[in-house]
Image (cartoon, rainbow, N blue to C red):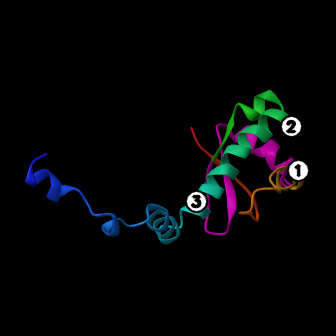
């Protein structure tokens, strides 16, 4: 092996533990909260398929979590939004129970028209 190649290899004491760096980066970027939020958004699709009618579940998707920690549901039709508003209390209660095991909680649901 050439002298040059030997000098490029790090010494054992020069190595930095990757787990410590990744943990710090994960915390600095607030990725844990974001991953929990993403899990909540994925849970909406499961909940909608299991508990809501096919016409409603196929017309909705989780869009984002707003600054008030409400899950914003994108809805394709104003008629479906109107129907969801009538059922909002029941759906919120059931959905919050559905995601109780996910540490990052939301304060409720909000419905927005989207195409």
Q: Looking at the image, tell me whether mark 2 or mark 3 is earlier in sequence order.
A: 3
The answer to whether residue 64 is magenta is: yes
62 lies above or below 66: above
Which quadrant of the structure image shows residue 43? top right
Residues marked 1 and 2 touching at CB (< 8 Å): yes
Q: What is the CA distance from the residue labelled 1 to the residue labelled 2?
A: 9 Å
Dot 2, how many residues are within 10 Å of its Cα: few (below 14), some (14-19), or many (20+)?
few
User: What secondary structure is found at the residue carrying circle 1?
Assistant: helix
The mark found on residue 94 in the picture is 1
Residues marked 2 and 3 touching at CB (< 8 Å): no
List the residue tagged with mark 3. 34
Q: What is the CA distance from the residue labelled 2 to the residue labelled 3?
A: 25 Å
67 lies above or below 44: below
Front position in the image: 37 or 64: 37
Q: Is residue 58 left or right of residue 51?
A: left
The span shown in magenta is 63-92
The answer to whether residue 100 is magenta is: no
Q: Is residue 41 left or right of residue 25?
A: right
List the residue tagged with mark 2. 51
Mark whose residue sits in front, 2 or 3: 3
């Amino acid at each position: 092996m050439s002298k040059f190649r030997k000098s490029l290899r790090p010494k054992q004491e020069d190595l930095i533990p990757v787990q410590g760096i990744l943990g710090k980066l994960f915390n600095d970027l607030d990725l844990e909260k974001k991953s929990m939020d993403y899990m909540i958004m994925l849970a909406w699709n499961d909940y909608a398929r299991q508990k809501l009618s096919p016409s409603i579940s196929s017309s909705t998707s989780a869009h984002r979590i707003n600054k008030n920690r409400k899950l914003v549901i994108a809805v394709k039709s104003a008629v479906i939004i109107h129907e969801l508003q009538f059922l909002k209390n029941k759906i919120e209660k059931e959905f919050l129970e559905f995601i109780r095991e996910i540490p990052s909680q939301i304060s409720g649901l909000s419905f927005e028209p989207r195409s």
